[in-house]
Amino acid sequence: MSTDNPTDRATVAASIQRLFRNTVVAVSGALSRRDGQVGLAVSGLTYFLLYLAGLRHLGLGPAGYEVSVVSNPLTRAFRQVGPFQWEPIALVVVGPVELLVAPLNMLLGAVLALLVGLNLAVSVVAWRGPAACRLGPGAGAVSGLPGLLSGFACCGPTILLAVGVQASAGLLSLFQWLLPLTIVALFGTLLWVGSRVETA
Amino acid sequence: MTLGGAGCAGDDGATTGAGSAPGSSTGTSAASTATDQNDRPEPPTADSRLHLDFEIGTLEENIVSGGVRKDGIPAIDDPTFADTPPDGLAADDPVFGLVRDGEVKAYPQYILVHHEIVNDTIAGDAVAVTYCPLTGTAQGFERGPVEFGVSGRLVNSNLTMYDRGTDSWWPQMLATAITGPLTGESLQEFRVTWTTWDRWSRTYPETRILTEDTGFQRRYGVDPYGQYNEKRGYYSSTRTLFEPLHDDSRAHPKAVVIGTRTETGALAFDKETLLRQRVLTGRIDDTLYVAVADTALETGYVYANPESLSVTASDDGYTIDGTAYDADSLPLDRTLSFDAMWFAWAGFYPESAYVN
């Protein structure tokens, strides 16, 4: 392989370093602009809510006001119920809105939402900026889709019913990889978008 | 291994799995005897195995992941009951009713859809009340000194339980272990009645009902599969989530049958037809079976009728030799029966007759 050559390895390392630096600069630049900040906030929050809804941790129910917590929340919070899914420790009901609080899932959702938001922020800025990026702002959102679908793997992948596909061992295995795939895809698109923004 | 001393369930129409002696004790006595030489707790098993249409090896090969981990769907191990129904329960919502020695309990479907197993005690006996949403089956099992949990695996779309003593795996409908140290053994079963809260509470005003205080936080108002009170979603769709072991087009896949299986075979009665006609007959091998409807609870009971006695519906119930009987107390040997979705019944028992 070409990377066996120390000079080539140094070139590759320099390219990667430049890619990361470029992305950091692009992200910083995007977040310094109002349209970038709005892009991050709106897309990040939207994704976060959709992720919780996909897990069925957020949705509508009978109207009421209630906050109830399990008796052993610290233990329960780390009890894994499925791939990248943990046990809810509290139920919050505000009017017709019900929220199951699973701290690790909320943390994971927040990380995913942040990545989606950064993708969108950079894409929006690049799209609107003078050095137009050929990548549309939808790329980050598309990268985040598998993460939304991963929630449906719980309790039998009922989303398959909606699309008329029968579950199989292979398909269920795929569901387990949706979330890691999302994280890789989101990082990948962020680097890609960052590399295409004129930062000089 | 079959362990003695664990008998059938009292006077609530229970059967004990094939072959166990009616009226014998259960529960705590079973608990004290249901251990093997290593003091490993085991659930009490029946004296003989229930009929299977498939080899155990074939069933084992068809175990699939349901998408959740072992105990990812948590059984209720410390159930609480109330005298009044929870706010989330409507009159026509389904409940699973259980009566034993004068104690009456109801388990709402909308709670069990999130837990599938309740490790409970009734009339001093340790029992498991179980529900599989994907096959529409509610069944009861003696559990002796052990609890049951949800393995996260399915066979023929059916909940596969594991016992926390031996870790043997028990597809609920088969009530027979297909992996683990108890492979080939059948559990002791008892009758659980699928009806509505309105019908159950009118028939048994003294009933207590499972509460949402399960020890877990869930959005109990949300059924991930659909809804029963006005059937929607998975419960009415022709689609199944997993491919059945055997496809059978004799009925709508989600049509409800009242099925019974013995040591020698299986038999299914269309529930809607039974409730309309009140008496249906069918055969397992050469033996005649009669199903009668309980119109108050909108359920049915199945009896072996080897003498081919004439059973007719009347205003007083059911008449045999000029005497009227209630649906649940015909002078015949009652077999355990339960509601199931047709595709699931036919999947496990493709050789079963279907009476409609």
Image (spheres, coloured by chain):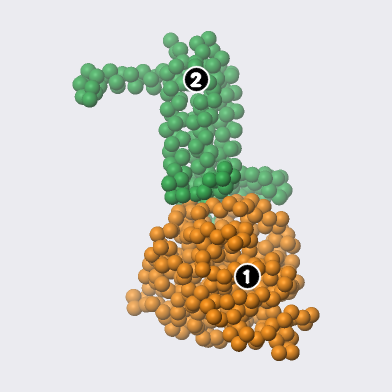
Chain colours: A green, B orange
Rendered view: A190 above or below B52: above
Residue B14 percent coordinates (x, y): 58, 78
What amino acid is at disc 1?
Val
| Of residues B164 and A133, the one drawn nearer to the viewer in this rendering | A133
Q: Is residue A92 left or right of residue B34?
A: right
What residue do we see at 43% from left, 38% from top?
A180
Residue identified by numbered label 1: B355
Q: Residue at x 67, y 52 (%)?
A: B232
What crowding class fits label 2: few (fewer than 14 Cα within 10 Å), some (14-19), or many (20 or more)?
some
In front of the other: B356 or A150: B356
If the image is split into quadrants, where does the C terminus of chain B sit?
bottom right
Locate residue A30, reporting x and y percent.
52, 19
- The subunit carrying tag 2 is A
- Please tell me whether mark 2 sits on a helix, a strand or a loop: loop
For residue B79, the mark is: none
Q: Amino acid at mark 2?
A: Leu
Q: Residue beneath label 2, please?
A: A135
Task: Measure how far apart labels 2 and 1 are at the Cα level.
Answer: 62 Å
Image point (24%, 23%), residue name: A3
- Residue B186 or A115: which is nearer the viewer? B186
Q: Residue at x 43, y 63 (%)?
A: B59
Q: How many marks?
A: 2
Q: Position of residue A141 (x, y in %)?
A: 53, 29
**Quadrant showing the N terminus of chain B:** bottom left
Q: Is residue B176 above or below residue A144?
A: below
Q: Dot 1, how many residues are within 10 Å of its Cα: few (below 14), some (14-19), or many (20+)? A: some
Question: In front: mark 2 or mark 1?
Answer: 1
Most distant residue in the right direction: B315
Tell me if I can see residue B308 in this picture.
Answer: yes
Q: Is any part of residue B107 visible from this angle?
A: no
> Which type of secondary structure does the marked residue at label 1 adopt?
strand
